[in-house]
Amino acid sequence: MLTGKHIVIIGGDARQLEIIRKLSTLDAKISMVGFEQLDDGFVGATKEQLDNIDFSTVDVILLPVSGTNQKGEVETIFSNETVTITTELLQKTKKNCQIYTGISNDYLTSCAKEADRKLVKLLERDDIAIYNSIPTVEGTVMMAIQHTDITIHSSNIVVLGFGRVGMSVARTFDALGANVKVGARETKHIARITEMGFTPFDTSNIVNEVSDVDIVINTIPAPVISADVIANMPANALIIDLASKPGGTDFRYAEKRGIKALLAPGLPGIVAPKTAGQILAKVLAQLLKDG
Ligand code: NAP
């Protein structure tokens, strides 16, 4: 149980509601900031203005998956207010207060560092990244269906990257009957790709692997789908770029060549916010219980 813990949940989307639901059943004291337009009430959770919170009692601050922008502003879907995180605000919390976020940026990382508070980036954890790959892949299948006029079955798919998302993408498209090639750079990944029945290639050789591709799905957060790669693709190929912004595609050149290239960030929150929230809630509750 989290009895006696004061948790401030600041901003976010429907995913945060699952977290609030879970943490309130564990008897935490929850203050919700940036939720005034939300009709639902939660037992043990109260809507508050940032200025009214006594931060000297706060054990945990939970930010949305997106963290803050470079000005410290938090995304608040359920509010018109601008909520800003500052070093001064974090310094008001208990000395051992922990800040949880999905991802971070230079601004948030330096605020936490200057305030000497621990910042936990949930999406960097293997368990969350692997669970999150499930709704990410479902969203990718949805986009592939929406943006092509062919079946996934028998189509030629190139997956770039064989990490937590890439492996799930390759396995799912293979299970749907596609011909799946996977680009990786480590020999152990080439071996695993082979073992799983896909066709491996070295990512550095990508330019020679796309001449008959129907869909390229990128999970590498680096500029791998460059102009020379795009120039070698069929005109009707589709690029779905899952890598974090700005993606790994030369979007300018893709547009010039008339190839449809889609940057698709945040699919779990779009296609399955409830499940995505439950994934975060489950891991977060365990982390908080472990202290
Ligand atoms: P990951 O486990 O770290 O996998 C990344 C893959 O990219 C690995 O195979 C890695 O190879 C490869 N890679 C990284 N830098 C490379 C480079 N410069 N050249 C060649 N290969 C490189 O990450 P993940 O959890 O799968 O996530 C992948 C991306 O998707 C991230 O940007 C993440 O933020 C994003 N994401 C997006 C969504 C969405 O909804 N669109 C959802 C979840 C995650 P090595 O193993 O050899 O380093």
Image: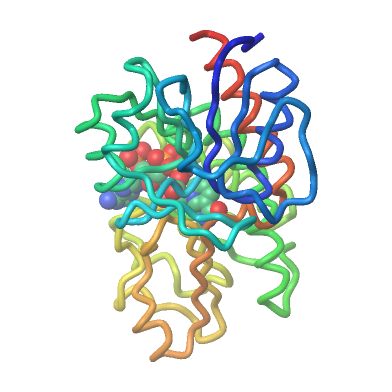
At which x and y percent is residue 155? Answer: 66, 66
At which x and y percent is residue 170? Answer: 58, 48
Seen from the viewer's position, the closer of residues 195 and 9 is: 9
Query: Hey, which quadrant is residue 143 in on the image?
Result: bottom right
Horizontally, is 291 left or right of 250 in the view? right
Q: Residue at x 52, y 72 (%)?
A: 262
At which x and y percent is residue 228? Answer: 29, 77
Query: Hey, which quadrant is residue 79 in on the image?
Result: bottom right
Q: Residue furthest left?
A: 114
Horizontally, is 20 left or right of 217 in the view? right
Horizontally, is 20 left or right of 252 in the view? right
Q: Is residue 142 visible?
A: yes
Q: Is residue 161 visible?
A: no
Q: Is residue 6 above or below residue 272?
A: above
Q: How many marks?
A: 0
Q: Residue at x 36, y 64 (%)?
A: 246
At which x and y percent is residue 260? Answer: 52, 81
Seen from the viewer's position, the closer of residues 9 and 128 is: 9
Horizontally, is 235 left or right of 278 in the view? left
Q: Is residue 88 above or below residue 37?
A: above
The image quadrant where one finds the N terminus is: top right
Seen from the viewer's position, the closer of residues 92 and 167 is: 92
Q: Residue at x 43, y 56 (%)?
A: 243
